[in-house]
Amino acid sequence: MTKRKPQKVVVHRIEFQTKERELFEQFMYLEQLNKLIDSLLSMDPKIMYMYITILEGVGLIDTPIPTLSDAPSTDEVLNAIHTIFTNRPVVGADTASTRDDITPLDAIIYRLTGQYPERFAPN
């Protein structure tokens, strides 16, 4: 059975007043914000940290979260990375001795405050 072509087209138009339009725009912004927040909360923290580091590295944002671009020198970056992953500070330290007393939390505290933990005496 073939479909008949329409004889006329009816257009329905909905018009909002200014206040209704403003409320609708606010609703749309909040919906977009909810979608953005949901996508950020479902993201793996490592991936989120990577994006924050990249954005901070190119100078688009500045966050209180410590990233590699916050380090004033390459030596400090190397020390932080090696201290966290190998428990052995490399730059300006005796690399033959391991530092088993340094934890990742100590490295983060040093990075945030710039002060060594009391039990840690730098070489």
Image (cartoon, rainbow, N blue to C red):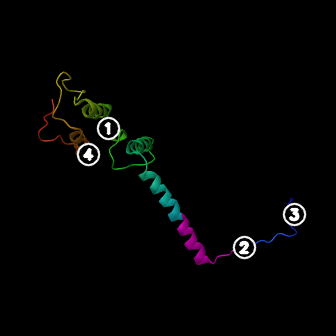
Q: Amino acid at mark 4?
A: Leu
Number of marks in picture: 4
Mark closer to the chain start, 1 or 4: 1
Mark closer to the chain start, 3 or 2: 3
Disc 2 on helix, strand or loop?
Answer: loop
For discs 2 and 4, the disc positioned in front in the rendered view: 2
Residue density around tag 2, few if under 14, some if 14–19, many if 20 or more, within 10 Å: few
Residue density around tag 1, few if under 14, some if 14–19, many if 20 or more, within 10 Å: few
Q: Residue at x 30, y 33 (%)?
A: 81
Residue indicated by mark 2 = 13
State how far apart marks 3 and 1 are (Cα).
Answer: 73 Å
For discs 3 and 1, the disc positioned in front in the rendered view: 3
* Range covered by the magenta-colored residues: 12-28
Q: Is residue 27 magenta?
A: yes
Mark closer to the chain start, 2 or 1: 2
State how far apart marks 3 and 2 are (Cα).
Answer: 23 Å
State how far apart marks 2 and 1 are (Cα).
Answer: 60 Å
Q: Nearer the viewer, residue 44 or 2?
A: 2
The reply to whether discs 3 and 4 touch (Cβ–Cβ < 8 Å) is no
Residue indicated by mark 3 = 5
What is the residue that sits farthest to the top in this orientation? 96
Q: Amino acid at mark 1?
A: Pro
The reply to whether discs 2 and 4 touch (Cβ–Cβ < 8 Å) is no
Left or right, residue 91 beside residue 4:
left
Residue indicated by mark 1 = 72
Mark closer to the chain start, 2 or 4: 2
Q: Is residue 4 magenta?
A: no
| Residue 112, numbered circle | 4
Residue 108 higher or lower than 75, as above or below: below
